[in-house]
């Protein structure tokens, strides 16, 4: 088995074709991140890195990527492959803040990294991966309606994405990088708001890959919650994506949050897999 390290998102996308063939939903996050990087170019500081494991017959059986300072994102893979990839990754990077990916691969990779480095792995978030093919209209439509976010709302949108990042415990980029990423979403018409006289909720989407579109982030300020805004907005964003170029929409929900899980199920999202996030603490 050979493990390849690369800084080329296009090369990575070619390598993970077989993973996408086998499990398109579980690996859509890997693919959409790489597609975004390929389209927008690598950042000047701390560029993304990729790795994959290839058997002697050429079949790729596991992969990871990292866009610093974020956690490592892992593909579905067995224990032996996880150990091989992370041992190779250790040659490039000695410390990781954590990792994220589908189960059981995430747990296997976290255990492998802990064994290699002596760091302590902590499960910090369990998630449900939901997929939708047809939208169910929400039973209760709140006042206002959905629309695309505008560039004159960039500051507000960036603040809300930052608030979402903090609330769910993600490791996000610096303020400038976050603003640039939010600007790109607005310019590419991949960010929508629910407008009830003013923006009251926001929802984004990643590029569609293999007719699958991933929704996120979804954020409503605390003072605007429990009014149905997020439910209606996610339904609207999902329908827009299905009308344009997607056959399925996918999203990740905190398994410990019954409110968000209920929202997505009402719209028509159905569980297809689970994922988890692990944080590493140096001994």
Image (cartoon, grey):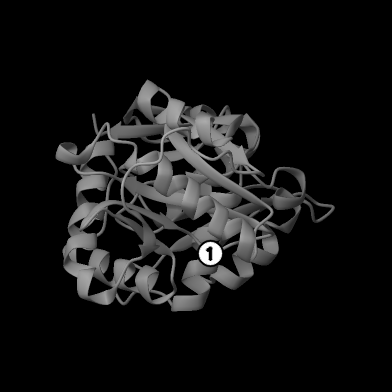
Vertical comparison of 19 with 43: above or below = above
> Which quadrant of the structure image shows residue 177?
bottom left
Q: Position of residue 42 (x, y in %)?
A: 41, 75
Residue drawn at x 47%, y 70% is 37
Image position of 167 with respect to 215: above or below: above
Tell me where residue 31 sits by quadrant: bottom right
Q: Nearer the viewer, residue 138 or 273?
A: 138
- Residue 222 appears in the picture as rendered: yes
**Badge 1 is on which residue?**
207
**Looking at the image, can residue 51 be seen?**
no
Residue 231, position in %: x, y?
41, 39
Q: Is residue 222 above or below residue 165?
A: above
Element marked by disc 1: loop
Q: Quadrant of the C terminus?
A: top left
Q: Position of residue 256 (x, y in %)?
A: 37, 21
On screen, residue 255 versus residue 193, left or right, reads right
Quarter occupied by residue 103: top right
Residue 152, horizontal then vertical, whole percent: 21, 75
Name which residue lies at 41% across and 34% down. Answer: 140
Q: Is residue 164 left or right of residue 147?
A: left
Mark 1 nearby-residue class (10 Å; few <14, some 14–19, many ≥20) = many
Tell me if 276 is positioned left or right of 131 in this view: left
- What residue is shown at x 19% (from left), y 43% (from top)? 221
Query: Which residue is located at x 53 percent, y 29 percent?
Result: 265
Q: Total marks drawn?
A: 1
């Amino acid at each position: 088995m050979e493990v390849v390290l690369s800084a080329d998102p296009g090369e990575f996308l070619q390598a993970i074709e077989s993973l996408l063939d086998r499990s398109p939903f579980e690996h859509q996050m890997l693919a959409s991140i790489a597609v975004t990087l390929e389209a927008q170019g690598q950042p000047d500081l701390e560029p993304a890195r990729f790795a994959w494991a290839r058997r002697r017959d050429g079949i790729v059986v596991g992969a990871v990527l990292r866009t610093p300072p974020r956690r490592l994102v892992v593909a579905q893979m067995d224990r032996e492959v996880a150990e091989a990839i992370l041992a190779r990754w250790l040659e490039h990077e000695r410390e990781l803040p954590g990792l994220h990916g589908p189960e059981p691969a995430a747990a296997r990779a976290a255990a492998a990294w802990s064994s290699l480095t002596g760091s302590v792995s902590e499960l910090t978030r369990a998630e449900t991966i939901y997929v939708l093919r047809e939208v169910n209209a929400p039973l209760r439509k709140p006042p206002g309606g959905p629309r695309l976010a505008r560039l004159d709302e960039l500051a507000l949108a960036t603040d809300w994405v930052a608030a979402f990042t903090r609330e769910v415990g993600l490791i996000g980029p610096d303020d400038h990088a976050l603003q640039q990423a939010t600007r790109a979403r607005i310019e590419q018409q991949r960010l929508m708001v629910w407008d009830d006289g003013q923006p009251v909720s926001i929802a984004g989407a990643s590029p569609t890959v293999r007719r699958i579109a991933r929704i996120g982030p979804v954020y409503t300020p605390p003072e605007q919650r429990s009014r149905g805004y997020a439910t209606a907005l996610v339904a609207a964003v999902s329908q827009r994506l299905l009308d344009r170029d997607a056959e399925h929409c996918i999203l990740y929900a905190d398994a410990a949050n019954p409110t968000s899980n209920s929202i997505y199920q009402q719209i028509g999202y159905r569980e297809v897999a689970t994922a988890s996030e692990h944080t590493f603490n140096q001994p």
